[in-house]
Image: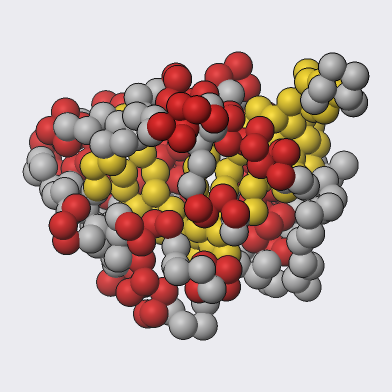
Amino acid sequence: MQRSGLLSPRSLVRKFMPAAALAPAWLPRTAATPTSRHAASLGRIGSLEVRLARSPREIRKAQMLRYHVFYEEMSAIADAEAQATRRDIDAYDEICDHLLVLDHDTAERNAPFGRKKPRIVGTYRLLRQAVAAQNGGFYTADEFDIQTLVDRHPHLNFLELGRSCVLKPYRTKRTVELLWHGIWAYVLMHRVDVMVGCASIAGTEPEGMAEQLAFLHHNARPPQDWQVKAVDHRFVDMNRMAKAEINDRQALRDLPPLIKGYLRLGAYIGEGAVVDRQFGTTDVLIIMPVSALNSRYVNHYGADAQRYAS
């Protein structure tokens, strides 16, 4: 990954932007604890709490948040169902766990005389390998040849991360901290070995993001055992500039915060990008073997994910 005299992606991120604790790293395994629809809180900072969705109503609220961010704030194209329901919905919602950040100081009333509920202000969708295997595979497989990676590591447990979004006023370090604290707790709970998922760059014209894509191609390519490509009919070449021509500082400045956060963790980027015209983005594949994550975050979140325990 790192050549003599050159900075790795993680080092570049640290050099050109403020450090921020975004996620944990792996520790020796703890006993797995199954989740339930009445799962306990996974953490809290002030009025904000992170936990899994406990009801169909909370999943609907998460879908409404996704619709607002993806379709109203960003440039996703809504189909008839999304327009009618004002929700971002797909078949995977029924089989995934939905990680939520809730604000208890901004409550919403469910009905005119109903009990007030905390507002859902952030969400991540989590799909475990065992569940995916029983339901046709991972969502990511539509864009990347993820199954070859899974088959190459038959003794490892994969987790897919997706549909990440946060309401605009809550896009702060505190909210991101809680989301990643929840993911860390979930990783420990289910003995996850590898996290994968798509991350998006706004726009559908790869030439307009050539420097960003080339930076990722040259600096965050995985070792051979972790290599995976975009599916052939959707493959977009990321090698659009020579490494010597890239302004690393500018490329990092232009990358979305989520991708910079993944790089800070030491994540790998798959080969090739995919244009998603429905969502108005160009997607890259994030590959994060838990054993390779940056160990400095363990102390931040705690060996047992208790730093922000309620």
Q: Is residue 33 left or right of residue 293?
A: right
Q: Quadrant of the C terminus?
A: top right
Q: Give the image location of residue 204, x and y in percent.
A: 22, 33
In the image, residue 111 lies at what x, y percent? 82, 22
Q: Quadrant of residue 244?
A: top left
Of 282 and 56, nearer the camera is: 56
193 displayed left or right of 40: left
**Is any atom of residue 193 visible in this view?**
no
Residue 213 against residue 155 in the figure, above or below:
above
Please give the name of the residue rendered at 66% of the width and 33% of the height, measured from the top-left corner: 61
Residue at left offset 82%, top offset 46%: 41
Q: How many marks?
A: 0
Residue 45, image x, y percentages:
79, 31
Where residue 95 sits, quadrant-wise, is bottom right
Q: Residue at x 57, y 64 (%)?
A: 128
Please name the colour scheme applied to the rendered image. secondary structure
Can residue 26 be spotted in the picture?
yes
Locate residue 141: give its quadrant: bottom left
On the rendered image, what quadrant is the N terminus found in? Answer: bottom left
Left or right side of 16 for 227: left
Horizontal side, residue 214 vs residue 133: left or right: left
> At which x and y percent is residue 54?
77, 47
Residue at left offset 39%, top offset 49%: 198
**Residue at the bottom extreme?**
155
